[in-house]
Image (spheres, grey):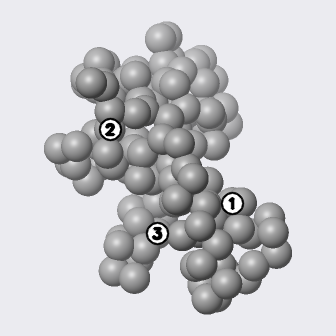
Amino acid sequence: MKILVQFCLTLGLAVAGLSLAGAGEVRAQGVPECIDSDKSGNPQATAAWWGRRSAEEKKYISELPCEERYIPMVCVFLWDPDMRGCTNRGVAEYRADKACSKKGYELLSAEHAACKEDFKKTFVPPFPASS
């Protein structure tokens, strides 16, 4: 439960931070789509932020679908040393929530939690461990 609360708080901070960015109309060069808001984004700040990301961070952010790109950004914000693991756990949680909500389970219900556990048993992480 503590992890869920931390995840929700972090997600809220990430969304709030992105929405509070200054206004700008030109997209930052080299930055993937969905990283900055088209309406209220700040292309210069986004480009500077993107330039400070490591190759690993850029890979995880760029290779996920738009609606999941915030997950590795949360891992960056939390300074998680296991970027791959953090991203995979976040994606598993996001996809499990989405799938179980689609099945009609009410959020935070016992059925929803059981559904998420079942989903995670068969979940294939987007970034498997390299051997």
Where does label 3 land, which residue? 8
Q: Which mark is residue 98?
A: 1
Q: CA distance from mark 2 to mark 3?
A: 19 Å
Q: CA distance from mark 3 to mark 1?
A: 14 Å
**What element does badge 3 sit on?**
helix
For the point 69% across and 60% down, which residue is it? 98
Dot placed on the residue nearer the N-terminal end, 3 or 1: 3
Q: Is residue 58 left or right of residue 102?
A: left
Please, what is the three-letter code of the amino acid marked with disc 3? Cys
**What element does badge 2 sit on?**
helix
Dot placed on the residue nearer the N-terminal end, 1 or 2: 2
Of residues 50 and 55, the one nearer the viewer is: 55
The quadrant of the rendering that contains the N terminus is bottom left
Where does label 2 land, which residue? 84
**What element does badge 1 sit on?**
helix
The answer to whether the residues at label 2 and label 3 have Cβ atoms under 8 Å apart is: no
Please, what is the three-letter code of the amino acid marked with disc 2? Arg
Please, what is the three-letter code of the amino acid marked with disc 1? Lys
Q: Is residue 28 above or below residue 116?
A: above
Dot placed on the residue nearer the N-terminal end, 2 or 3: 3
> Which residue lies most toward the top here?
29
**Label 2 Cα crowd, 10 Å radius (few <14 / some 14-19 / many 20+):** many
Count of numbered tags: 3
Would residue 9 be visible to someone looking at this image? Answer: no
Q: Is residue 79 left or right of residue 47?
A: left
Q: CA distance from mark 1 to mark 2?
A: 21 Å
Image quarter for residue 114?
bottom right
Of residues 30 and 100, the one nearer the viewer is: 100
Q: Is residue 33 above or below residue 6?
A: above
Q: Which mark is residue 73?
A: none
